[in-house]
Amino acid sequence: MKLSEIPAVLREIGVSPVKSLGQNFLHDRNLARWIVEQARLRADDYVVEIGPGLGALTEFALAKGAHVLAIEKDKRLVKFLHEKFADQTVEIVHGDALEFDTRILYTKRRVNLLGNLPYYISSQLLIKFLESPSPISMWLLMLQKELAKRICAVPGTSDYGALSLQVQLHYRVEYLRTVPATVFLPKPDVDSALVRISPRDERELPACDHDVFERLVRCGFSQRRKQLGKLIREQVPKWEAIAAELGLNPKARAEELSLLQWIAVTNQIAPIIPARRFGVSEEQFQVVDEQDRPVVGAARSEVHANNFLHRAVHVLIFNPAGEVFLQLRSRLKDRHPLTWDSSAAGHVNLGEDYDQAAARELWEELGVETDLQRITKLPASERTDFEFMRLYRGSYHGELHPDPGEIEAGKFFPPAIVDEWIKARPDTFAPGFVECWKVWRRKNA
């Protein structure tokens, strides 16, 4: 929409730009077209657009053949957008993007996020939609220039801080261009910038405890002028020794440490300990015959190398809302790393029965105890990694404590979302979980 057209359209629909909603309408069509080009959209992409306004970006995203879900807070603009894009592959949602349930995006094969984020809530929106792990494949965001520089910043610069590190731990950020205030109506007080964000390969950086990393970084940047060692003394009492071991200046300030160095410091105070069962030849599994009768004990590596029939347990934990907790398996797992799995799962060791193994796995992986109900038993097959699997259900109201050596991340999901997610992205799940879930849903339809 041209600059000369916007005032007339706004008058016609009874809209005066509301500063409290951060309403600044893009009027440069060439720029809007260029911005959407940077998203590299495919015809089958699902696009979430935050704050579509008068549809400047929406128009070009639809022209690429994408399906667009546009979230607009101003109900007057919602009505306008419904009329403008009638009969096109667009959903116009009247709501606050901060309240949008991002879990539904797991049900789409490939998701891109576009947005000219309102300045007054851009940080909150950024944190919400960059929560890791994420179902979103690419973010193309118009941000206040100052904020864009912060998330792109490199060590040793004034813009480099806790937000830079929190974002860059999981994502790569590209500063594409500065966008002058003059391309918006009304004209904002500051320039904007366009950034493109994409997920890192989780194996690109060393594993670390993400919660500890974020707490340490926030503390380290709490007073920029102070030496880092003095700010994190409570968390890192032996700072001088750790700094020497890592080759760091003990008098360094927070902005002098790179992302890799912050990860290294985190791992000094909260090391990721791989699950005790990984690659430990002494760990013995119960090998069984085709009727699941015990035969002999054998080392984990021998069982997996020869596809011996053995036993496993899967536990589904539900919260009071009826949502199931799924875990993202650790990158350190020897089988199916970085795939989604049951709340807790593992092998039955020699000398254990199924019930004992289920209780142990729940405690080791999530740090909780609760009554477990037997649901079913699945036969061994190639889809179950030659495991006889017994499935359990439990309820828990309280905080879970995932072991970072076992679990990369975890989240509660409504069962209906899990159903559609499996259809849309079956490759993101451990195959054994999919078999268990099919049985669970048949029994609880």
Image (cartoon, rainbow, N blue to C red):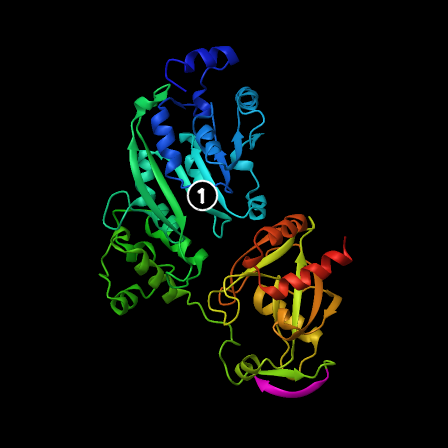
Up the image or down, 346 lies above or below 259; here it is below
Q: Secondary structure at mark 1?
A: helix
Q: Amino acid at mark 1?
A: Ile
Up the image or down, 247 lies above or below 12; here it is below
Q: Position of residue 297 (x, y in %)?
A: 62, 87
**Residue 189 in view, yes or no:** no
Q: Position of residue 362 (x, y in %)?
A: 62, 67
Asked whether, in this view, residue 105 is left or right of residue 29, the answer is right
Q: Main secondary structure of the magenta part?
A: strand
Residue pointed to by mark 1: 127
Q: Position of residue 417 (x, y in %)?
A: 63, 48
Q: From the viewer's side, name the closer residue of 165 and 244.
A: 165
Indicate yes or no whether the magenta region holds residue 334. Answer: no
Up the image or down, 243 lies above or below 290; here it is above
Q: Write the residue at 58% across / 27% down.
A: 87
Where are the magenta residues, as a range? 293-299
Asked whether, in this view, residue 418 is left or right of residue 35, the answer is right
Asked whether, in this view, residue 18 is left or right of residue 94, the answer is left
**Label 1: few (<14), some or many (≥20) within 10 Å?**
some
